Structures are given as structure tokens and as C-alpha cells.
Image (cartoon, rainbow, N blue to C red):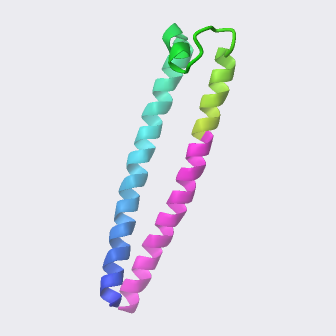
Amino acid sequence: MNETLQKRVRSAAVAGWWTVLIVAIWMTVAWLALLVILNSKPGWIMWLWGFPDADSLHWRQMRIIVLQFFAVFKLMLFVFVVVVIWLTLWSRRLKREG
């Protein structure tokens, strides 16, 4: 039973680290893309966000929304990293005991 649990926990930890890597890459690419888009200020982005007239949403507000989104996403990623570290340590502990 202990060996099966150790294998499952280790598999979850490995999958978690791959997920962290993929999410970190996605966040980096998305952040760079949004920086380029927000600095070029295309008109279609306002329409895409549901604000066809530029008076209802300004570029400064849009930057704040994007910054808040990425801040919350990074906090969620941090929590996930802590969980994956815990899984990794637990897996090593189970291996040592078994």
C-alpha cells in the first residue's frame, strides 16, 4: 500500500511540476503579447473587450485590469507551486520510509 501511494504522490508531483512549467511559459508569452498590444493601442482591442467607444474604457484602465489579472494569476501559481513542493517532499518521505 505504501509503495502504491508513493508512486501516485510522485506522479502527482511530476505532473504538477510540468503544469507549473507550462503555466509559467504561458504567462510569460501572454504578458509579452499584452505589453506589445497595449503599447500599440489598436482599435480592435477595445471592440474585443466589449467597449466599441473609447470613452467608456481608457487605455490606462485597461493596463490596470491586465496588471491585476496577472497579479492574481501569479498568486494562484504561487499557491500551486507550494502544493507541488509539498507533494514532492511527501513523495521523498514516503520513499525513505518504504
- For the C terminus, the image quarter is bottom left
Relative image position of residue 78 (x, y in whole percent)? 56, 54
Task: Based on the picture, tell me whether residue 88 belongs to the magenta stretch.
Answer: yes
Query: What residue is drawn where x is 67% and y is 28%?
Result: 64
Residue nearer the viewer, 51 or 62? 51
- Residue 24, image quadrant: top left
Horizontal side of residue 39 vs 21, given as left or right: right
Q: Is residue 94 above or below residue 29?
A: below
Left or right, 17 with reference to 44: left
Q: Is residue 31 left or right of residue 94?
A: right
Q: Quadrant of the N terminus?
A: bottom left
> Hey, which quadrant is residue 11 in on the image?
bottom left
Q: Residue at x 57, y 58 (%)?
A: 79
Mainly helix, strand or loop, the magenta region?
A: helix
Q: How many marks?
A: 0
Residue 57 percent location from the top left of the image = 67, 16
- Magenta part of the chain: 71-98
Q: Position of residue 17 (x, y in %)?
A: 39, 59
Residue 68 lies, in percent from the top left, at: 64, 36
Residue at horizontal 40 percent and vertical 78 percent from the top: 91
**Which of 17 and 53 lies nearest the eye of the viewer?**
53
Residue 39 is inside the magenta segment: no
